[in-house]
Image (cartoon, grey):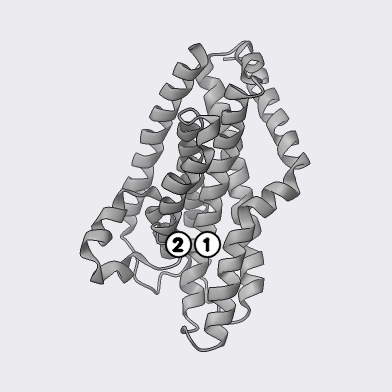
Amino acid sequence: MNWKTFVAMLSRDARVARRNFVPLLLQTLLQPMLFVFIFGRVMTGSGLMPREYKSRLLPGVIARSMGLSGIQAVALPLVSEFQFTREIEDRLLAPMKIEWLAVEKVVAGMVQALTAGLVVIPLAWLIMGSGVDLSFHHPLRFAGLALMVAFPASAIGLTLGCSVGQTQIGLMFSLVLAPMLFFGCAYYPWSALARFPILKWAVLVNPMVYACEGFRSALVPQFPHLSGFAILVALLGSDLLFLSLGMRQFRRKAVS
């Protein structure tokens, strides 16, 4: 593979992202920050929810922001490039295999997802105010989880971006992303579904569950969460599954 070409394409995507940094940031963080303000500040400050809920909420908000940013960063440009601007045709002429072009998209999405995670931590912490009890005693574990969350998010974006049409973007958000985010245990721990046994086991097919529970295991280990082994296996499985699906869809779309 021509690494110079790969790095050049990655640099180009980075420049585009920097140019659209503010709109991308607002698009990714506005809704999570509204949830943080209402549930992490208003509801806890008024006594309607316990103060410890802040610590349970923040890891889920980090995972949600990273997941949504990674998916959007890959899926939306791909839909446009394949079906509207046809910009992808110029990229396909680059001196490297088609699969590496898909990998470049995933890497660019991971960078944006990690950036969203780094931005949301201090911002959400500031909005919530006092009472957030996070542990940073395992920074390497947190960093590893961040990479493992950014990877499947970008791979899901690759799969969706190569599978939906331009007129189906709204449907994608309604039928795929909204259920994934709201049933991904971002605003409540997985253990809170104990009274809903069918839903409790059904949501385990959602990779967002393991992203949220993974960050809880790293940042608030004092609260109940899924086992580290289950989180590791599920995130690795999601990485392999969606990357293989996305690569196959990308190649099919590119050569058609």
Q: Residue at x 62, y 20 (%)?
A: 88
Residue 82 lies, in percent from the top left, at: 58, 23
Query: Which mark is drawn over residue 132?
Result: none
Query: Which mark is drawn over residue 61?
Result: 1
* Sequence-first tag of 2 and 1: 1
Q: Residue at x 41, y 22 (%)?
A: 248
Do the CB atoms of the residues marked 2 and 1 lie less than 8 Å apart?
Answer: yes
Left or right of 185? Residue 3 is: right
Q: Residue at x 66, y 65 (%)?
A: 123
Q: How many marks?
A: 2
- In terms of secondary structure, where does tag 1 sit? helix
Is 244 or 148 nearer to us in this picture? 244
Q: Provide the residue designation for mark 2.
A: 186
Is 139 or 179 nearer to us in this picture? 179
Is 112 or 203 nearer to us in this picture? 203
Q: Which residue is most to the front?
A: 167
Looking at the image, is 81 positioned above or below residue 240? above
Please rate how many residues cluster around mark 2, counting C-alpha atoms within 10 Å: few if below 14, some from 14 to 19, many from 20: many
